[in-house]
Amino acid sequence: MSRKSLDSYSKKTRSNALKRLKIELAELSYAPMPEFEASPVSEEDFFEWNAYIHGPANSPYENGIFKFNMKFPQNYPFSPPECKFITKIYHCNVNSLGLVCVDILKDSWIPSFTISSILLSMRTLMSDPNPYHPLVGTIGQIFIENRELHDDTARDWTSKYAMNSSYKFSLPYSPKS
């Protein structure tokens, strides 16, 4: 493939990814989900988004609000975004850097997944961790051997890091009507 053809292909791929991200933003704006909010970090860069995920009820993360970052590749949706929790979270499938170990962001990714499906998957992971395939082995082991200690620690971290009373639901960018 010539350099010119490759450049043209790259521009078209980026353009298609941008169109897809704008469509997803419109869908989130017109049919918001109570479980989370998400938008691009800025109007100039649709390839990086922040979300705020509400901790699921009846979980140690209940009443917490967790900031979550997604960086989309130029060939989205054919490749998954890089995702991580910005808010510290005590979870066997999330490491100290906030990186997440979940199959839909790796080998099981398919182009029909959306930002909403990613964020709903994160909420499901919060309610139903996978301690048998942990990213943080010690937390997975505690979950298996002493669920009460695990949940108490997760609640403490949620209280300390995810219950900032000054948080207001306003993301930096939302589409104009």
Image: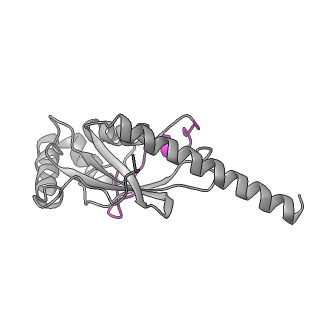
Foreground: 85 or 101? 85
- Magenta-drawn segment: 93-111
Where is residue 31? Give x, y as percent. Answer: 35, 34
Say which residue appears at 21% left-offset and 51% top-offset.
65
Q: Is residue 67 visible?
A: yes
Where is residue 44? Give x, y as percent. Answer: 49, 64
Instruction: Say which quarter of the image contains residue 122.
Output: top left
**Above or below — where is 144 with respect to 96?**
above
Where is residue 12? Give x, y as percent. Answer: 72, 52
Q: Residue furthest front?
A: 177
Seen in the image, is 85 located left or right of residue 111? Answer: left
Seen in the image, is 142 located left or right of residue 15? Answer: left
Where is residue 140? Give x, y as percent. Answer: 29, 47
Say which residue appears at 21% left-offset and 43% top-offset.
55
Query: How many numbered badges does the structure rendering display?
Result: 0
Asked if residue 101 lies in the magenta stretch, the reply is yes
Asked if residue 138 lies in the magenta stretch, the reply is no
Q: Is residue 106 visible?
A: no
